Image (spheres, rainbow, N blue to C red):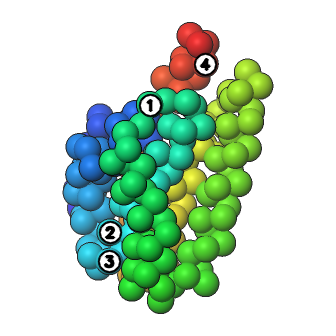
Amino acid sequence: MKMCENARTESLASSSQTPAQPMTQLLTQHLQAFNLPPSATAWLVMLWDAIQLFDDVADADPITRDDLDTVIWATLVAMPSNPFFAHNAAVLLPVVGAMILKWQASDKVERAGHASAQSYMWRAGFYDVVLMTVQLVHGARYAADNAHFVLGLYGERLNDYLGEFQNA
């Protein structure tokens, strides 16, 4: 199986691109390799776009009005009404909640000047959501057999991450 083999060279985690840009297209391509239903892929891409925009806001990075409007609609209308999410919300919401808590903890540590291997991994909770989605669609055995491909989606390297804070 050759799923997502280029994810390391085209980092999804470290992109500063915003919704509707090439990173979303790259993520969509990688997710399609898992043979997810279109509604599952669409929900994950909307979640990705939302967390990227929220991170940009938290970092005071510039965002466009169009990107903001897209994420407002996605988070308040499209994501909650997505058929995959609606059917699996009881399982997905706790994973999304944990993703948020992990990002908040990582962000707090980073802002205090203590970025570490732990904060590096905790900022990547989105991939926990991807793995749970794969499990919901295909079962635990398939998810276990392909978890390393989900891990491969996280293209940012630890040294690059830590370097961001040494140069800040």
Q: Marks 2 and 1, how far apart in space?
A: 25 Å
Q: Quadrant of residue 113?
A: top right
Q: Secondary structure at mark 1?
A: loop
For marks 1 and 4, the one nearer the N-term is: 1
Q: Marks 4 and 2, how far apart in space?
A: 33 Å
Q: Position of residue 108 (x, y in %)?
A: 74, 36
Single out the residue that lies furthest toward the bottom: 87
Of 141 and 154, the residue lying toward us: 154
User: Are circles 1 and 3 on residues that touch, CB within 8 Å?
Assistant: no
* Mark number, residue 39: 3
Q: Marks 1 and 3, how far apart in space?
A: 29 Å
Residue at image position (23%, 43%) is 22
Residue at image position (42%, 37%) is 63
Of circles 2 and 1, the one toward us is: 1
Q: Which residue is mark 4?
A: 165
Q: Relative to 127, is 117 on the left or the right?
A: right
Q: Which residue is mark 1?
A: 62
Q: Marks 3 and 2, how far apart in space?
A: 5 Å
Q: Tell me if mark 4 has few (under 14), some (14-19) or many (20+) residues whose alpha carbon lies within 10 angstroms of its own.
A: some
Q: In the image, what residue type sits under mark 3?
A: Ser
For marks 2 and 1, the one nearer the N-term is: 2
- Tell me the quarter of the image containing the N terminus: bottom left
Q: Which residue is mark 2?
A: 42
For marks 1 and 3, the one nearer the N-term is: 3
User: Are circles 3 and 2 on residues that touch, CB within 8 Å?
Assistant: yes
Of 19 and 140, the residue lying toward us: 19
Q: Secondary structure at mark 3?
A: helix
Q: In the image, what residue type sits under mark 2?
A: Ala
Q: Relative to 135, is 103 on the left or the right?
A: right
Q: Relative to 105, is 41 on the left or the right?
A: left
